[in-house]
Structures are given as structure tokens and as C-alpha cells.
Image: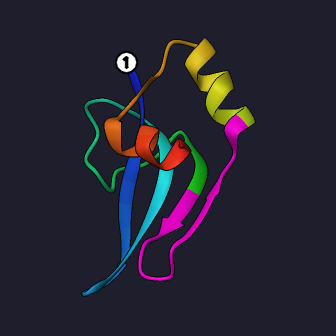
């Protein structure tokens, strides 16, 4: 099953998150099927490819609560 979730990156005390489509059994920073956007919380910047997310949802992917929050 494919999940659309956040993958953490960045430095200590300066997190950076990518919105990714990834197999459910992969680790948080595991290899992603596709990068769908990013979020930088310290600078309050968000960029999400909504068309790509909708395409993954049509294929049966599930979105995590964190990504749902960013979409609103």
C-alpha cells in the first residue's frame, strides 16, 4: 500500500520535510516513489503539487493526517 506522508530532512533544530509517496513498509527517510512537495516549518513555507497528490489518491494511496493538515 502506498502512503502520502512527510519525510524529514534538514539539520538538527532546523527540520525540513518533503511530501512523498512511499510504500507503507518503508522507513520515514526511505526511498520515495515520488516527491510531491515540501514544507519548511521554521520559515513557514509550503509547496505542494496537488495534481500529483490527486493522481496518487486515484491509484489507491492513503494520505497521513500531517499531509491532510498541510493541504488545508
Q: Residue at x 42, y 73 (%)?
A: 41
Where is 46 relative to 42, above or below? Answer: above
In this picture, residue 38 sits left or right of residue 66: right
Q: To which quarter of the image does residue 65 belong?
A: top left
Query: Circle 1 sits in a helix, a strand or a loop, which is it?
Result: loop
Q: Position of residue 13 (x, y in %)?
A: 26, 87
Task: Using the image as rendered, state which of residue 11 and residue 33 is in the foreground.
Answer: 11
Where is 65 relative to 10, above or below? Answer: above
Please name the colour scheme applied to the rendered image: rainbow
Q: How many marks?
A: 1
Q: Position of residue 29 (x, y in %)?
A: 33, 56
Q: Position of residue 70 (x, y in %)?
A: 48, 49
Q: Which residue is mark 1?
A: 1
Q: Position of residue 58 (x, y in %)?
A: 62, 13
Q: Residue at x 51, y 12 (%)?
A: 60
Q: To which quarter of the image does residue 45 belong?
A: bottom right
Give the residue furthest to the front: 72
- Residue 42 is inside the magenta segment: yes
Where is 58 relative to 6, above or below? Answer: above
In this picture, residue 40 sits left or right of residue 46: left
Task: Using the image as rendered, state which of residue 46 and residue 55 is in the foreground.
Answer: 46
Where is 26 relative to 13, above or below? Answer: above
Q: To which quarter of the image does residue 1 belong?
A: top left
Which residue range is magenta in the image? 38-50
Classify 10 Å Cα crowding around label 1: few (below 14), some (14-19), many (20 and above). Answer: few
Q: Residue at x 51, y 74 (%)?
A: 44
Task: Using the image as rendered, state which of residue 37 and residue 22 is in the foreground.
Answer: 37
- Residue 58 is inside the magenta segment: no
Amino acid at each position: 500500500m502506498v502512503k502520502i506522508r512527510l519525510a524529514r530532512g534538514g539539520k538538527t533544530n532546523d527540520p525540513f520535510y518533503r511530501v512523498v509517496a512511499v510504500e507503507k513498509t518503508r522507513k520515514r527517510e526511505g526511498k520515495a516513489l515520488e516527491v510531491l512537495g515540501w514544507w519548511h516549518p521554521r520559515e513557514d513555507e509550503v509547496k505542494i503539487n496537488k495534481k500529483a497528490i490527486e493522481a496518487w489518491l486515484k491509484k489507491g494511496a492513503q494520505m497521513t493526517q500531517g499531509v491532510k493538515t498541510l493541504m488545508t
